[in-house]
Every structure is written in structure tokens, then in C-alpha cells.
Amino acid sequence: MLSNIDDDPDEESSTVRMARYIAEEDPSSVLEVGCGDGRLFRALRREDWNAEYTGVEVAEYVVDGNRERHPEANWDVAGAYTLPVETGTVELVRSEFVVEHLVYTVRALREMVRAVKPGGQLLLIFPDFVCSGRLASQVLGFSPVPTALERLRQGRLVDSVVSLYDSRVRLPRALKTVREEVGPFPVNLRPQCLTYSEITSPDVDAVYIASKDEVEEWAYNHNLRVTFPWGRSGRFYENAHMSIHKPPRSGRQSPSE
Ligand SMILES: C[S@@+](CC[C@H](N)C(=O)[O-])C[C@H]1O[C@@H](n2cnc3c(N)ncnc32)[C@H](O)[C@@H]1O
């Protein structure tokens, strides 16, 4: 049964693009980590991909809703750090706009790769904050007001100038150098959502300073091949779409930190 949550899906969305890719790859099983309300599952069914799908989510009420809407799929309450599957049993693991919300990114990457069958793949979509020079979870200037112009309208001249400087100069520079200065897989310890809990716009709760170069480097260091099925320029420069392939037989090194 398809629900009407997204009966009219955006053909250009990453979910539809991903569903077409998966349907073409035609894996025997898909595990989705941080599946939300089941958008991908519905998109896959629209593409006539009908094999085994499991979606996991941390929020129980979200899983309950998915079970009610789509009892034909498997839905589990679980987090990215402890997936409810045997090692090497899923042909394709997929996670969209989740890794940037995790404090322990490497633990999640390792866990997702663990679930993948030899010869299978892990598909990841995430915003590349280093490439975009933007990070919605970072407070700019002295207030959470979204734009410098808006601050100016509110008569906050100093706040407006400082926020403009922060967004155009300070933040992009800090994002480019954060790995050298902080170390691998850096996180924002004070995301906006902790200071201004009333703000609910996208990524105010992002913590990992997500970078496709860093995730790619991690994968190569663990003998995992990386591809970018849609490339890594244009819209895919700021929104990474990457596939991490597990070798058909286990490599020399296991995915550990
Ligand atoms: C921005 S939403 C994306 C949802 C869905 N993938 C989509 O694209 O519609 C981020 C999702 O990650 C989930 N999430 C957050 N922390 C998680 C964790 N530790 N393990 C698994 N999922 C997590 C949230 O519950 C939320 O559904």
C-alpha cells in the first residue's frame, strides 16, 4: 500500500534519484538507516523494486507509523551504531541525510559497512559542509536570526555586520581547516538546537562537519572502493552522493578506526 504522504514526489529529489539507481542495481535486500517516514520505500515500490526492505529509525513513533502504513516491509527501532542485522547479510545499505547528525560518525560507518554483504555497497547522501562553506547548526553573529539583512531590519547593526563576516569569511575558512585543527571527524559541540531549541529549520541539529573527502579517505584506508554514481561536481559538490563498495571477499583490514 502506498500512502499519500508523497503521492506527487519531486522527480529531481535525491530520494527518487536514489530509488531509480537502486531499482537498476536490483539488490536482493536493502537496509535503510534513519529511514524517516519511509519515503525511499515508497519510491522503490513506484520503481517496481519489490525485494526485501528494512527501515530503521531511532524514533519509535516514526517506526509505528511506518508499520501501520507499510506492513509489508520490515521496520525496526534501532540506531546507526547497533544495527539489528547479522554481519555481511545485506546487499545494499543506504542512509540519506543522517551521518551529519551523528556524533560518532566512524562508529556508524563501520557498523553500516559491517552489515553489507561482500560485493555489496553502502550508499550515502549527506551535505558536504566543508565544500559549501555553510553549517546551519553554527550560530552566526550574536543571535539565531537567519540573515544579516533581517538583523539590519530589526535595527541590529553590529549583529548584522558580524554575522555577515561570520557567514562569508570566518565560517567557510573554519570549515576548510577544521580537520587540521581539530582532527578527524570533527563535530560542532554547540549546535544551534541546544541553545535555541525553538528553531526547527533543517540541519540546526547537524553535528558532524560532513566532508565527502574525509569519508572517502576513511573508506580507502579500509580497503573499500568508493564511487560517485552522479559525480562530485555541480549539485553533488555540496550534497555528496557516494557509494562505498565492500570487496567480494573480505579485504586484509576490517573497517575499524
Ligand atoms: C534529516 S532526517 C532524514 C530522514 C530520511 N532519511 C529522509 O531523507 O527523509 C535524519 C534522520 O536521521 C535519524 N537519526 C538521527 N540519529 C540517528 C541515529 N543515531 N541512528 C539512526 N538514525 C538516526 C533521525 O531520526 C531522522 O529520521
Image (cartoon, rainbow, N blue to C red):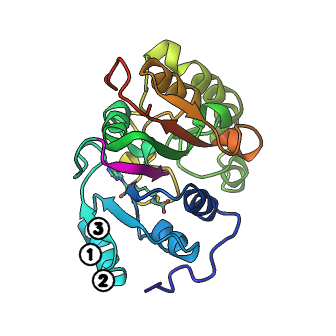
Indicate which quadrant contains ligand 1. Answer: bottom left
Q: Are marks 1 and 2 in contact (CB under 8 Å)?
A: yes
| Sequence-first tag of 3 and 1 | 1
For badge 2, the amino acid type reads Glu
198 lies left or right of 58: right
- Residue 230 image offset from top left, x and y in percent: 69, 45
- Distance from disc 1 to disc 2, alpha carbons, whole Å, reads 6 Å
Q: Which mark is residue 86?
A: none
Residue corresponding to mark 3: 75
In the displayed structure, 115 sits above or below 220; it is: below
Secondary-structure class at tag 2 = helix
Please say whether residue 151 is one of the residues in the magenta stretch. Answer: no
The mark lying in front, picked from 3 and 1, is 3
Quadrant of residue 226 within the rendered picture? top right
- Residue 160 image offset from top left, x and y in percent: 68, 42
- Residue 82 image offset from top left, x and y in percent: 23, 45
Q: Residue furthest top?
A: 180
Name which residue lies at 41% across and 64% down. Answer: 36
Name which residue lies at 36% across and 47% down. Answer: 194
Q: Residue furthest right?
A: 234
Q: In which quadrant will I find the N terminus?
A: bottom left
In the displayed structure, 218 sits above or below 160; it is: above
Magenta stretch: give its range: 88-97
Residue corresponding to mark 1: 64
In the displayed structure, 6 sits above or below 158; it is: below
| Sequence-first tag of 3 and 2 | 2
For badge 3, the amino acid type reads Trp
Please say whether residue 89 is one of the residues in the magenta stretch. Answer: yes
Quadrant of residue 153 within the rendered picture? bottom right
Given residues 246 and 4, the one toward you in this image is 246
Residue corresponding to mark 2: 68
